[in-house]
Amino acid sequence: MFKSPLTGNLGESYAGGRSATAIRMAGYGAIVIRGSSETPIYLAVHGDKVYFRDASGIWGMRSSYTVGRIIRELEPGAGFRTIMRIGKAGEQLVSYACVITETYRHFGRLGLGAVFGSKKLKALVISGKHSIKVPDSRVYREVYDKIFDLAIKSPLMKKYHDLGTAYNVTPLNELKALPSLNLKQTSLEEAVNISGETLAENYLGRRVACIHCPVACIHLASLREPYEREPYFYKTTMVSYDYEPLYALGSMLGVTNTIGWLKLMDEVEVQGLDAISVGVVLAWATEAYEKGLITDRETMDIKLKWGDYNAYIEAVRRIVAQPNEFYASLARGVEYAASKYGWLDFALSFGGNEMPGYHTGLATYITYLTGSRHSHLDSAGYSLDEKNIKAGRRQAPNEMAEALFKEESWRQILSSLVVCLFARGIYTSSTVIESLKAAGFSSKFELTEESLARVGVEILKYKYMFKIREGFNYKNLRIPKRILETPTPLGLLNEEEIRETINIFFKFLR
Amino acid sequence: MVYRLAVIDVERCVGCELCMFACSRRFGEGGLAKSAIAVRSIGGVERGFIVIVCRACSDPPCAKVCIVNALMIRKGGGVVLNQYKCIGCGRCIDACPVKAVFWNSEINKPNICVHCGYCAKYCPHEVLKLEKVV
């Protein structure tokens, strides 16, 4: 949790990898970082020991990969530690800089990287090997086995093990719900080139799992590039790919050249940026440039053009370096840039956060607008839309608002327990209660389905109390015109219906 | 019948570490304090993983350096730890060339694999297998 430099409001971000387990194994429930350092440092927490290490020698390093490699050699705990680090984007305080963990997972959204940067905190390493005592070993093993079986047999296991989240590109493109070219379109003919199938068949080099998860949804593409001047000399880079970056740096920018997409993705990793935000920012800039609203003077002669990944790679570098006012504005997010240069109508952010990759219908936008983080994962409206599409119905606003409120409330419990949201089907409230009892929490908390549901609502209300304190007012939520002009699979959206559903949603929060 | 834990295809390892957690769970607890198996990357997860398990040596170097005879030769290879004899000197760790002697810092004694195969049951990717030793 943090205050987001992107939205100026509630910041909250989750990542895969090993961070959550490492914190627990080091013997903690949470780590709080207060204040800031005068000189660059990194923190190492090994069990009950905390070390403040000088990071001035790795500050300003070009690639976030290198930072990871260096710290990996310096610190103990290989195999069970987490190394959270920032790239140059975080140092340069780009409002949507991310924190990278275990090289290929990210605290991506809302600018945690800039928060680290502002503290001069280059990295946070955590390791430990504690034991965790349980009240009844037999019960603990039984509950464990039950969850293990559910995970192994779940259909998600196959889907996300085989193709990873990139699986979603093809169905969303076919559904005409894949935001493309700054949402001027909802599908691309060449989307197949950036689909999970194409990537798995031609580029998949390795699958990796987050700690303690059998699924291994992390997919790494192997990009083999020849050196131009030297025959038979190649470099091979491993690039992690997932649905959201395929949307934001792919369909949204018209980058459907597979190798081009991989190169652009790699640069975003090198710099340490949130792929979703930077993709949406560049999509706005491209459309503004296309319309002549911004010119070569602003872009410093970079010709932003749909599909031109080389131009985008250079633009990404400049967003981080901020050589002029225009790039410095892009570094503060699309809401800021469009407020300054105009053309908010096609600046696709909600509550100040750049839009995720679903133009599925009304529910997904209600999620972006009402979600406490303005993230698609707050209440998964896209999933509700997909159900409505299958059922061929338009859901009434009150029914939709209630369903999304219930979902976001329940997700407070899952997120507090650091349950991966892919596993939400496994962690039903009865399984959660069973697990908490097995872990010895029954004497500390009232564990019933009702009490969990109530706590979920309470957490959500606390988050909104913070948001309101920091100036949030749902009546001021901006709805970009573009989303009303491009049809969803459930037809055109209208602003009245969106406002009505938002109003109902916020009644539940009172 | 005597068994030995073997890594049959390390290329299939995804680094989920379910085996490490299984090993400590065998003792009826969570966490990693008692694990006698380790997984780590080969200098970055993009290069794959190393899975470190006891090889069940027929002439185990760890036993040779134990000054209190706490490590007894196991039938079929490897050693059995007598915790009561062990004084926690840690010489066995240095003696093992594959670094398969792990340390429980909560009790200051080594974690020695007993080749029970509990971890292999939780490996969903066919990396580990309990093999018969003649």
Image: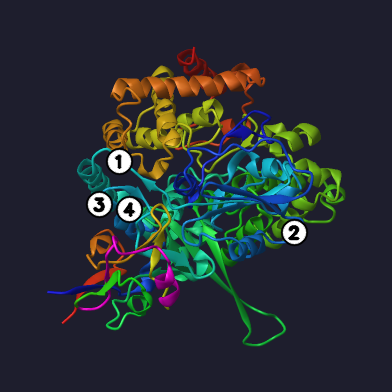
Q: Same subunit under labels 1 and 4?
A: yes
Identify which residue, A307 or A243, lies in the foreground. Answer: A243
At 53% across and 35% down in the image, what residue appears?
A375
Q: Are marks 4 and 3 in contact (CB under 8 Å)?
A: yes
Q: Please tell me in which quadrant of the rendered image residue A115 appears.
A: top right
Q: What range is drawn magenta here? A: B76-96
What chain does badge 4 belong to? A
At 46% across and 65% down in the image, what residue appears?
B40
Mark 4: give few (<14), some (14-19) or many (20+) Cα within 10 Å: many
Task: Name the residue type under label 3.
Answer: Lys
Point out the residue furthest to the bottom here. A231
The kind of secondary structure the magenta stretch mainly shows is loop
Q: Circle 2 — which element?
A: helix
What chain does badge 2 belong to? A
For mark 3, what is the residue? A153
Q: Distance between the residues labelled 2 and 4?
A: 38 Å
Q: In this view, does A346 lie above or below B11?
A: above
Q: Residue A18: which disc?
A: none
**Residue A156 seen from this side:** yes
For mark 1, what is the residue? A134
What chain does badge 3 belong to? A
- Residue A149 shown left or right of residue B41 in the figure: left
Identify which residue, A423 or B49, lies in the foreground. Answer: B49
- Residue A360 shown left or right of residue B116 in the figure: right
Q: Residue A314: which disc?
A: 2
Q: In this view, does B93 lie above or below A454?
A: below
